[in-house]
Structures are given as structure tokens and as C-alpha cells.
Image (cartoon, rainbow, N blue to C red):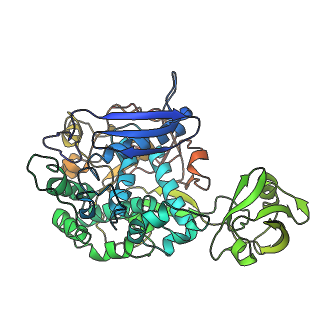
Amino acid sequence: VALFDPRARRCPVDRYLFLTMAVGDGYGGLEHRASTALLCARNELPYRGMRGVSLEYHRFLALASHEYFHTWLIKRIKPAAFVPYDLSRENYSSLLWIFEGFTSYYDDLMLLRAGVIDLPMYLKSLATTISAVLRGPGRLRQSVAESSFDAWIKYYRQDENTPNVVASYYAKGALVALALDLTIRLRTRARRSLDDVLRLMWREYGRDFYAPGALQRGVAEDEFPQLVRRATGLDLRRQIRDWAYGTRELPLPQLFDAIGIDFRLAPPDTAPALGARLATRHGELTVATAYDGQAARRAGLAAGDVIVAADGLRVDEKSLKALLTRRRAGERLALHVFRRDELMRLDVELQPPAKTEVRWRCRSANQPNSRRSSAPGSAARMNASPTRNAATPASRIRRTSAGSRIPLSVTTSRSLGICASSRSVVPRSTSKLRRSRLFTPISRLSSCSARSSSRSSWTSISTSIPWSAAQRSSSRICASSSTAAISRMQSAPCARASST
């Protein structure tokens, strides 16, 4: 509510209902004008005595946040092609990367801003999204705008070759939103953000959409770059063309570097890879997808092949993985597979493991950028949003003595010393912290214990396994202080963040 209407803070509905069906195994949601229908697994619901936010509960919270966000973005702010929406036929739009992708970006970000999840859990989730996008060759074959338009015939009719030819307008759309948000904040020195673009869209298209006598209209297919320029003063037509309507890689390493976070990709382990996604079906180890241009496809493996032996020994998923750990990239592995009823032998030249693990490191305030960047070096915030009934952050900082800690969200600034996972900063002086919009306190956060460290190290956030099975243990984010009050610190796993 505060994001879209920071002054009046009026919710577009008087009552909102989450209709949730808990089953043994299921996941999904569908938004409505004043409600949402959710499907979740029973183990994703909170239970009595639960400490903190578990991986499973976070998954459910993200789903609820996503569908609730649609109350504004898609149920009121709509593409022009959906006004009015014709339920008797398919409706096509190339803007789903905005309406679903931006929603996917904000669903976890809203949980962070509200204090429901902590920073390590947010970064873990973001790393999972980045890894999922990079594992799919389809991002290099199809733009998210094309994926949006083809949703009816491709995204919702997926087959074994979908990862090779289709880009997800949900996942990659979320990363496009992240890249645009960081770009806007850097170029405007954090005076504007993607939030301002959404607020303009709300005023123009959403706020009075259902008002009596109002003219209902939606966002035109080519209008978004103009909205960005009106809201921020920036001409980002080239970036939008390259990132949303083209297939260029997003410059996430450069953008993270500009806000003080070193970002790189590393392989999850040292074992060589087949270049295929495997699944056990009816007790048989089956090739689910053979990725374009990778080892399995080059050797002739195809989706649906059943692997029965490797180097003359019967294998299942576990034993094949153990076998690969004993091999090196470039070596050949003889696979016996059944394709329908035909037994075949295929020799696979093993490839180096894919770099799918995201690693972060927050630099100290006095540590220079590792890359040259044209973006301003001042503070850039991903987590700047209005707070509810709280003293302004600037006033809280003015009342804080030097060396004391105050709650903070995702912030990097050369004038601040940051302990990222404890979300606290130590002001060097109040004269540099006058812009209240740069700082937003998160209410009632439990602080983290920290231990001093003589050197900063990379923080490994593994995302090489699917979301549903990932172990979302609290990651450690290493950050260094720019003042003598805090030496280099490496935080311990965070305590529970109280829900506001």
C-alpha cells in the first residue's frame, strides 16, 4: 500500500481474502480483484513453535506476496491488450515481463522491506533466480518480450526442449526489473528508483480503474520507456531494448559492483558435467533435457533416453554422480541407454562444471571498486520504501550517537560501515546522512551476533539444486567498516526477523 500510494496510503480494496488449499504436494496461485486462490504443500505452512522463517514457509510467503502484489499490477494496472479482457479467447501481450516479471522481483523485496525475511534469505532467493536463468540456454534464443507474446503457445505448453528455446518472463523478467532498478538508482544518486515508475503507472492507469465513470485504459505495448523517462528523467530505451526485447546478458556484475557488492559465478563443485538435466521416472534414470551445445547433446543423447549403465556398470542418479566426481573434464564416459526399445552406446566427452553458484562479497566503505563504473559512487539502495508510522530515518540517525548501531536494509555507501546480515550501520557523521529517502528502518529486527575476522572472504550461496530442494540456510555476508568502531566482521547466521 505504501509503495503505490505513499501519501494517502489507501488500499484499493476494503477486504482481501487468501483462499489457500493445502495439499500433500502442490504449488501455484491465481490472482483476483480482491482475493487470491493459492495452492501449497502442507509442510510450507507455519507450525506451532517454529523458529524463524523456514525455506518451506518462505516459499509460501513469496507466493502470497506475489499474488497480493497483483492487486495493483495486473488487476488494475493492465496492458492495453487486456482492456477489456476477453475471457472467450486468448489475449496476447508482449508486456508480461513487466506485469509478471516485476511482480516476481517485488514479491521477495516486499517481504524484506516488511521485515518478514532477513537479508541473507533475500540474497539467497535472488541468487536462486539468477542461477535458474543462467542454467537455461533459452535466454539466448528468446527475449522476454517474445516469451510474453508466445506464452499461450510455448510457456504454458512446455516440453522437454523448452529450456533450450524459451526464456521465462517470470524469472528473467525479475532480473530485468533488478537491473533497471539498480540503473535508475545509480544514475539518479538514489533520488529515483523503479518504485517511482510503478507509482506513475498507478496514478495513470490503476488508481481509478474501477471508479464509476472512469475511462479504463492500459499500458500500450511501446509505452514503457516513456513512462520510465517521465518518472525518473532517464532515457533507458537502449537498456530496455537490449534486456527485454533482445537476448543480451544482463550486466548484473557491473551493477552490483557499482553498489559495493562483488558478484561472481562459480561452479557448485569440481565434478565434470554431462550437460543434461536428469530425472528418475518409474525407477529409471531418464534424460529430461539435453542442453543445446553441451556434452550430452553433442554425444547424441536426447530427452527421454533411459541411462542404464556407465562404463559397463549399472547406475542410478546417486551412483552416476559419485562416478563423475572421480573423473575430469575432457575424459570420455561410455553410456548405455535405451531409446524406446533400442539399446545404444554413446561416448560423452565430459565438460567442465557450469558456473551456477552465485557468490557475493560486500566491500568495505574505503575499498575501491574492482571495476571502473560510470555510475555515481554515492549510496544506491534496493530497499528504499516508505515505512509505516515510524520516525523518519534521518531523525533516527540524528538522535543516534557516533558508534551506535541503527537498523538498516540493503544499503551500500562510501560514508557507511555496513554489517550486511545484521542490517546495522555506524554513521561517520550526520552531515552526510541528510537525505532521509536513502534510509529506511526495518522494524523490530533481531540483531545478529558477529565475530571479528582478519580478512574478508567470499560468501558462497549455492543454487545448483532446484528451489524446492535447496537448503536455504542463512548465508554469511562479509562486510567491512569504514570507521575505527568496527573492525572487519563476518556475521553469524541471523536470528529471526519479527514480522511487522
Judge by depth and name the residue closer to the eye, 366 or 292. 292
> In the current view of this chain or complex, which residue is farthest to the right?
312
| Residue 38 in the image, given as x and y percentages of width and height | 43, 39
Quadrant location of the N terminus? top left
Left or right: 430 in relation to 239: left
Residue 373 figure quarter:
bottom left
* Residue 175 occupies quadrant: bottom left
Task: Measuring from the top left, give residue 122's x and y in whole percent.
Answer: 44, 47
- Say left or right for 288 vs 480: right
Q: Where's the C terminus, which quadrant? A: top left
Q: Where is residue 370 in the image (x, y as percent from the top left)?
A: 44, 68
- Tell me the quarter of the picture where residue 6 sits: top left
* Horizontal side, residue 207 vs residue 129: left or right: left
Looking at the image, residue 241 lies above or below residue 24: below
Q: Is residue 131 above or below residue 476?
A: below
Q: Is residue 381 above or below residue 223?
A: above
Does residue 238 appear in this view? Answer: yes
How many dots with numbers?
0
Q: Which residue lies furthest to the top in this view?
A: 48
Q: Can residue 422 be seen in this view?
A: no
Residue projecting furthest to the front:
88
Closer to the camera in the image, 155 or 364: 155
Q: Which of 26 and 250 lies nearest the eye of the viewer?
A: 26
461 vs 172, nearest the viewer: 172
Q: Where is residue 184 in the image (x, y as percent from the top left)?
A: 27, 64
> Looking at the image, which residue is at 25% across and 36% down?
400
Residue drawn at point x = 56 percent, y = 66 percent: 162
